[in-house]
Image (cartoon, rainbow, N blue to C red):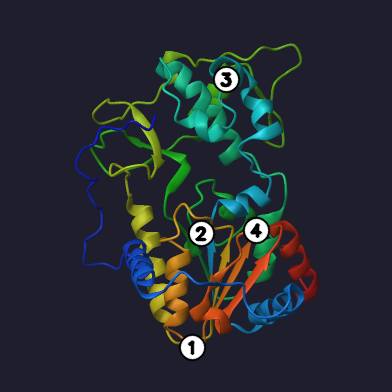
Amino acid sequence: MFSRRQTKPAMKSFSDSRPDGYRETIQKGVTAVRQYDTKISYGNGTKGEQLARLKTELQTADAIVIGAGAGLSTAAGLTYNGERFRKYFQDFADRYHFADMYSGGFYPYSTPEEQWAFWSRNIYINRYMDPPKPVYRDLLELVQGKDYFVITTNVDHCFQKAGFDKQRLFYTQGDYGLWQCEEPCHTRTYDNEETVRQMVLAQGFEIAEDGTLYLPDGVTPKMAVPAELIPRCPRCLRPMTMNLRVDDTFVEDHGWHAASERYSEFLRRHEGMHILYLEIGVGANTPVIIKYPFWQMTAANPRAVYACLNYSEAYSIRQLEEQSLCIDGDTADVLKLLNRETGGD
């Protein structure tokens, strides 16, 4: 699935002269790495004091920029291992001995029929089913009616499903709900929901009225999909692949560029204002997209505040100690507490 041929980068559908929030924010991240040392800070005050300050910032900030990583979806129950993995992929685990969906996504399956059996289940439960916990809706309660924008490395579409304004979202790394040409021969992406549904049904699964995927009692799932369901590019007939940023063939389509431009303009429009950079669940895999740029933009604006919500990895840097809030804990619990204290439902 991810062994795309290393070809020239996908063509851009927008002129290079238009604002590009993605590359601009990465440049900010690179600048931050060069400017700051590695001494970290956990913010000033107790956890309770920092929570109280965050409540105030949420209420008084002129604008809120949310930067979300995988930890936010994990807090919502979209775990890639454990019971959830075994429920939908025990047959693959038994045959190939991997223990999580992430590893299964990179496994070199011998046939495309088997490859798409794994991926269709993966796509369906992580893109088209609602997350088990209402974490994203709780976050929306905190920013509803405020001037906000979201940049995220998550590809599960949970923000939009929870009701966030689509015009205020930037999915930098792709979308489980989109396919692209493997080459790619062009820069269009394609919705995959209907075909994915057909694939999981063909394996013996059923879809409940609430959209939940389940296996009927006594049914052993097939580990292959019919050959006629395997997606191919409508232009060059090469195989289709996931629209995920794994190499330089990732397609940045028209919608991606429009979102990138909106993010860039949102940041410009609020330069020098009282901005809350709210980072949630961002780990160490891609800090140059959210964490480091948030540090750089906070340092450049004395009115800005950087808040980091994370389980066991809530920290800032010493240079931003006075402008930082670092709250260690389960994001689901923190958001519920903030909603209760700020008047959300």
Q: x and y percent of residue 246 in the render?
A: 37, 42
For disc 1, the marked residue is: 302
Closer to the observer: label 3 or label 2?
Answer: 3
For disc 2, the marked residue is: 166
Q: Is 268 situated above or below 116?
A: below
- Quadrant (top left, top right, bottom left, bottom right) of the N terminus: top left
Q: Amino acid at mark 2?
A: Lys
For marks 3 and 2, give the CA distance: 35 Å
Res 280 visible: yes
Q: Residue at x 24, y 36 (%)?
A: 6
User: On the picture, is 253 further left or further right than 298?
Assistant: left
Q: Amino acid at mark 3?
A: Phe
Q: Residue furthest left?
A: 8
For marks 4 and 2, give the CA distance: 31 Å
Which mark, residue 312? Answer: 4
Q: Are marks 3 and 4 in contact (CB under 8 Å)?
A: no
For marks 1 and 2, give the CA distance: 30 Å
Q: Secondary structure at mark 4?
A: loop
Which mark, residue 92? Answer: 3
